[in-house]
Image: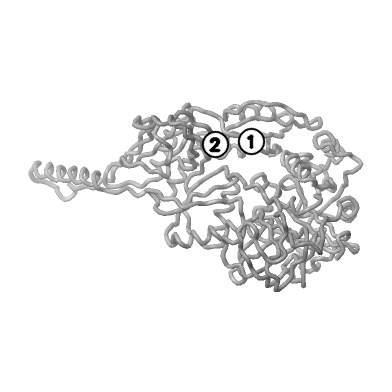
Amino acid sequence: MRLQSIRNFCIIAHIDHGKSTLADRILEITGTVERRKLREQILDDMDLERERGITIKASSVALQYKGYHLNLIDTPGHVDFSYEVSRSLRACEGAILVVDATQGVEAQTVANHHLAVLAGLTVVPVINKIDLANARPDIAELEMEQSLEIKRSDILRASARLGTGVREVLDAVIERIPPPDGAPDAPLKALIFDSKYDDYRGVVVYVRLFDGVVKMGQKVLMMKTGRIAEVHEVGVFSPQMSARPELRAGEVGYIIANIRTIHDVDIGDTITDEKNRTAVALPGYVAPRPMVFCGFYPASGTTYEQLRDALEKLHLNDSAFVYQPDVSEALGLGFRCGFLGLLHMDIVQERLEREQQLGLVKTAPNVTYEILLTTGDKVVIENPAKFPDPAQIEEVREPVVRVSLVVPLECVGAAMKLAEARRGRYISTDYIGQTRVSLNYDIPFAEMIYDFFDKFKSITRGYGTMDYEFIGYKAANLVKVDILVAGKRVDALSMIVHRDEADPRGRAVVKKLQKEIPRHLFEVVIQAAIGAKVIARESIKPLGKHVLARCSGGDISRKKKLLKIQREGKHRMKRVGAVEVPQQAFLAVLSAENEEG
């Protein structure tokens, strides 16, 4: 296949602007999928993607159109999966930028366009959903010209739902996006941009070939891990895996080799021929920085080993998800897991529960903190339970993100009030067209991971969008709040908060726990404390037993004796009795935060 007839491109956009629908129409027009097999979101093969109506994993498919070989990658739109977008861009020479005609340029539209420009891709701008009654393509064009610096003459209009203008989009891909560079006779050089684990075939590696040829029987080397494997099968996605005799420079496809160990594959690694090796490896990817952490522990019916194996397989398919072993006094052996955001965390949890049939106990989420000790050392804390003694702390630094809030003009005041209530620092205001504004704030990430997005959507009546990027750590007056149940610290419920918010947060949590923990035969005291200082206290009354029920008469001293025995028994149980904290209580910190907000 000649390089001049290949086009590698992806579809990028804000969430729910029609990427997957456009991909469906492209598959239909190119005849890649038979009409009787067509269905909505055909490239979204996970049940979670269909139920939530969002793309979670980037999907690749090979197309034939007018004598050209097109490799399409459909990418997610949510900010939590921007790492999937950045990986896909590295495997392409161009990108279709989709903008909803009814919504215009959104926060993630700007972010994805910026990523594509930085990667040196040719952008084909498309305004989608022009068939809707409330479509305003002229205003959308103006916004794209003003905020993205795209010429209005380059913008195409289409309706992915009806198929209007989709052929023109494909023609523009062929005309505007350059063919890939590469030399089929050079040493093999292929980039691993994704992978998954198959129980029967081992690790399936998704690759983009920059140079050389790979075919069955060839021995290849993973340059970063040093693993040598013999290729059993190569092919392309159409959209199911379709075997081919070989893959050549410029193509996108998959490789199946005798790779049985998950640790032998690293996303961003370079594959080359074992004997005729390339001189320089591809630069790969910058490792994503997890922003939200929580603990996953096996529930009843699930073992630690089952959870460990499931996390290994999931990490291979989602390299932005990280984990490490952890031990909790309350929950036992488990794992401390890192995610790019709350949606990412929810998706990982659901995938573990559905795909691997695991029972999980999840602790409340938190962010990472940098702590400067009095000794001059700097430590990073991912678990509040490992917060150092206050006497050893010189300074505590929290992660801060630069947030872009795109809102209608009438919602500017409410959005600014919300951002400032979450300790946000105002940066600037940018106008997008005549009806919308982009507000830029620096906000501590810990203030956003609970219900910030929900409240933001509420005050903007669903019309607001947001994007954020990590900008660094900044010093703040933070303290660790411990939760004690019956005098014992529950490490899984510890939290790090701003000192001004410690009292209300502590009261909210102990009140929530008072409702969640069942009554015992003795009084259970629940406390929130900063060090040795108790800042909130609630108690759960003991269950009562009517020991005098059978004493209808007789000497009063007999009744006093029975009551005394009961009191002594309750005191003894209080000293030695164990309080079982149910799973719901470990989400009490999160729920209490929502109620406090």
- Secondary structure, mark 2, is helix
- Secondary structure, mark 1, is helix
In the picture, residue 105 is in which quadrant?
Answer: top right
Note whether 542 is above or below 93 in the view shown.
above
Toward the viewer: 197 or 162?
Answer: 197
Note whether 302 is above or below 345 in the view shown.
below
Please tell me which of labels 1 and 2 falls first in the chain.
2
Relative placement, left or right, of 399 versus 391 is: right
Question: Residue 522 location, x and y as percent?
Answer: 26, 44
Relative placement, left or right, of 72 versus 449 is: right
- Residue 76 visible in the shown view: no
Question: Residue 333 location, x and y as percent?
Answer: 41, 54
Q: How is the image coloured?
A: one colour
Toward the viewer: 52 or 551?
Answer: 52
How busy is the neighbourhood of tag 1: few (under 14 within 10 Å), some, or many (20 plus)? Answer: many
Asked if marks 1 and 2 touch (Cβ < 8 Å), the reply is no
Query: Which residue sits at x=48%, y=32%?
Result: 372
Q: Which residue bears the numbered disc 1? A: 456
How busy is the neighbourhood of tag 2: few (under 14 within 10 Å), some, or many (20 plus)? Answer: many
Measure the alpha-carbon separation of dots 1 and 2.
Answer: 16 Å
Amino acid tagged 2: Ala
Note whether 150 is above or below 42 in the view shown.
above
Toward the viewer: 531 or 161?
Answer: 531
